[in-house]
Amino acid sequence: MGEVENFSVAGADKVGPVKKPLSSGDRKIYSGLIVTFFIVANAIAFSHLPGNESWLIPIVRRYAGFFGLEQNWTMFSGLRKANFHMLSVITFADGTQKLYEYPRMNLISQQEHFIHEKRRTLFYEYLPGRWGRKYIPSMARYLVWCNEDPKNNPSIITYIYNFADVPKPDPRNWVHFQDLPWHWDKTPYFVYRVKRNDLLK
Amino acid sequence: MTSRFKLLCSDICARWNSFWFKPQSALPVSVFRIGFGTVMLFSLLVQFRRDYLLFFGANAVFPTSSIDLNEWNRGPAFDLLLLLPSEDGFRIGFLYFSALMAFFVTIGLATRFSSLMLFLCYLSLCNHFPIVLMGGDNFARIISLFLIFTPCGKRLSIDCLINPVSSVQLYTPWAQRVIQVQLCVIYLVNVIYKFAGEQWRDGSAVYYATRLLDYTRISIPPFIDLPAVSKMLTWSTLALETSFIFVFWIPNKRIRYAMLLSAFLFHLGLDFCFGLGPFEWFFITSLILFISAEDIETLLSQVRAKTLKTSASSTLSSTAQSTGT
């Protein structure tokens, strides 16, 4: 597309093979920016190391967020040793109950798995962790909105965490993927009482 | 001693200047632009679009005020979505505008402007609901920031058709180098984190990773799923990732390309085994930046010649058929 073949000799000479090189001053400015970027970027990247988390993250996030320099390259570094799925029990004013099951990524198709990857991040990585706990009331309120009925509004939302530890890797008793234990441990870990101002209608 | 030190300093300076500023062809970064734009377009229209209102709608699952307090500590965060009226229609329009910018980047139309807009839109999406972001999103945001400063619209683009430039024109590659170095920094940081984790040192990481139901896309056949294989895969992953920090810079093309191929297969394998969205695709696309411009040029001219040959032979055969000879 639009290559040199389209030019006359005079036309090609105008654009030339060499652009004006950067001056020494420009190179110094660019070098400074590059070095600053990598120092800041690495400070952010290492802020997730255990020990740094508590004091460094609030500082770097405050400034990194504005420029979009947030970095977290901890992928697969500390792997979970349990499988789980979450449930919410919605109790209505008349005492009836409804079960809401959060997306089960292993029970949906590959295509749906890809499409709903963001849900997986939220429901499997963020919400159950210590950082996500503060959002659980908001999640409860969202469930209230989805189940509003002026005659019989939700009154209590209970979160239940169903989990099973992945068996330790023991060569004499090797557990294959297909034989993983069912999530039989059930822990109600948060109960939310619905307030009047939680309702949309 | 002083003169030796001076010599060393000037040598380092010369190498530094050569690495960041020695003019290079715009071809690798232009091919990279096409790949990156395509992945971004796909990510925005497929991944963000489906659950968009759940996260970004007027009645999103978590209110903006909570995100502002808990994630940004009421500090500054760039977010164009906050400037729009709080209605779902405008929010969806914003997503489609972002996707349009990604499409413009892919085809290279008003490349500098569209890459700037893509960065600002993507930054807004990321800052508006940061808790659904993965490493891939972080990398994509950094790429889109530095793509603005690259000459990525100078080859294989609509801009090039409108305003032809010489294919032998060379450009300062500092922004392209930042993306390349950033890729290696990711491997470095990730390897450090992995070495800090017990599971990678004792060889059990792959065992646990392949048993996480929410991640795993395929169940590994029992005949491969063996203790020894699991340990070998864990340690070879560490070895490969450690080597990726350095080997992409090796001048020897054969070794470099062999390592690029292994990195490509490594990420493809991870994408096949684990559902991480377009995470691995951003890494695979970034590998293009390490291919030399001459080799891409040769490949392109071969493709062009083949296309011309095919179209010429089909024209000839259709002409022969119509004249009955």
Image (cartoon, coloured by chain):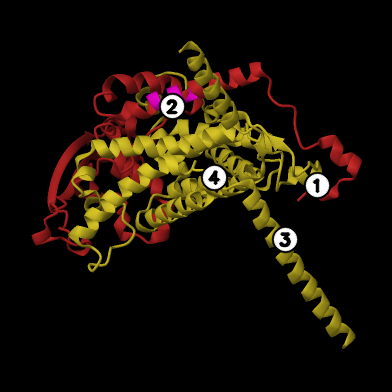
Chain colours: A red, B yellow
SS at mark 1?
helix
Residue type at mark 1: give it: Val
Q: Residue B210 in the image: state x and y as whole percent.
A: 26, 55
Q: Is residue A148 magenta?
A: no
| The one of A24 and B37 positioned closer to us in this rendering | A24
Label 3 SS:
helix
In this picture, is A90 found above or below B171?
A: below
User: Which residues are drawn in magenta?
Assistant: A37-43
Q: Which residue is mark 3?
A: B304
Query: Are marks 1 and 2 in one subunit?
Result: yes
Q: Chain of mark 4?
A: B
Q: Which residue is mark 2?
A: A41
- Position of residue A130 in the picture relative to residue B21 (left or right): left
Amino acid type, callout 3:
Arg
Q: Quadrant of residue A113?
A: bottom left
Q: Are marks 4 and 2 on the same chain?
A: no
Picture coordinates of residue B173 (x, y %)?
Answer: 62, 34
Residue placed under numbered mark 4 in the picture: B290
Task: Return the x and y of residue B235 as percentages of the image width and height.
Answer: 27, 49
Same-chain status of marks 2 and 3: no
Q: Quadrant of the C terminus of chain B?
A: bottom right
SS category of the residue bearing label 2: helix
Cα distance, mark 4 to mark 2? Answer: 22 Å
- Direction bottom: furthest residue: B324
Tell me the amino acid under the disc marked 4: Phe
Q: Main secondary structure of the magenta part?
A: helix
Callout 2, which amino acid?
Ala
Whether labels 3 and 4 share one chain: yes
